[in-house]
Image (spheres, rainbow, N blue to C red):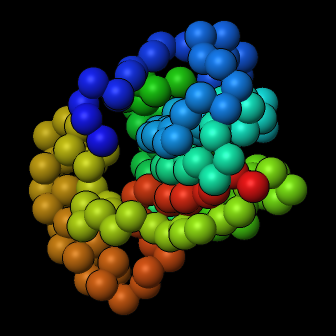
Amino acid sequence: MPLSKIQFIEDDIRDIKHLKNDFCNLILCFGVLEHFENNISALEQFHKILKKSGFVIITVPNLYSALTVTKPVSKLLGLWKLGMQKHYSRRALRKIIPPHKFEIVEEGTMIYTELFGSSAKRIPVIGHTISDILQKISNIVVSHYNFLGFMRFIVVRKL
């Protein structure tokens, strides 16, 4: 595909106004849905603007990651700057995909070797030491448990 056919458009994913119906072949939604209470409306909008058999690739924070633990600690220490953010298990992510509108093509966890520790670096004085220890644990854990990881992804195709 020539680059001249690629467009980047800024809009509200819960109420897309700048694209016609059946316009897109591919939607990339990386790290967005988790910040909305009503993410079902976004999926409805994706369905509207996608061409038949078009794809949506979605990433969201994985429920089974250290972020689930470090987020409350970061909030307590006043280090959390991301506002509202949900975390998804496999089942929770599948649940927001309307089965009569999309087919799940692929899904999984994005393995990230720093499963534990990135938030720990911000803890005053001992943060880097804790982070180094957690990094070693992370490497062991992600090599044995494929449901663990920083991000969860799903690829869906419009029916």
Q: Do we see residue 155 in this rendering?
A: yes
Q: Would you say 117 lies left or right of 101 here?
A: left
Q: Residue at x 86, y 56 (%)?
A: 100
Q: Nearer the viewer, residue 130 or 10?
A: 10
Q: Would you say 146 lies left or right of 123 here?
A: right
**From what the image shows, is residue 78 above or below residue 30?**
above
Q: Do we see residue 60 in this rendering?
A: no
Quarter of image, res 88? bottom right
Q: Would you say 41 lies left or right of 75 here?
A: right
Say how many tags the image has: 0
Q: Residue at x 35, y 28 (%)?
A: 6
Which quarter shows the N terminus? Answer: top left
Q: Would you say 84 lies left or right of 145 here?
A: right
Give coordinates of residue 138: x percent, y percent: 28, 72
Give coordinates of residue 60: x percent, y percent: 52, 48
Q: Residue at x 66, y 65 (%)?
A: 104
Q: Nearer the viewer, residue 6 or 68?
A: 6
Which residue in the rendered view is the most extreme toward the right?
100
**From what the image shows, is residue 79 above or below residue 103?**
above
Give coordinates of residue 34: x percent, y percent: 59, 38
Give coordinates of residue 103: x percent, y percent: 71, 63
Which quarter shows the C terminus? Answer: bottom right
**From what the image shows, is residue 108 above or below residue 41?**
below
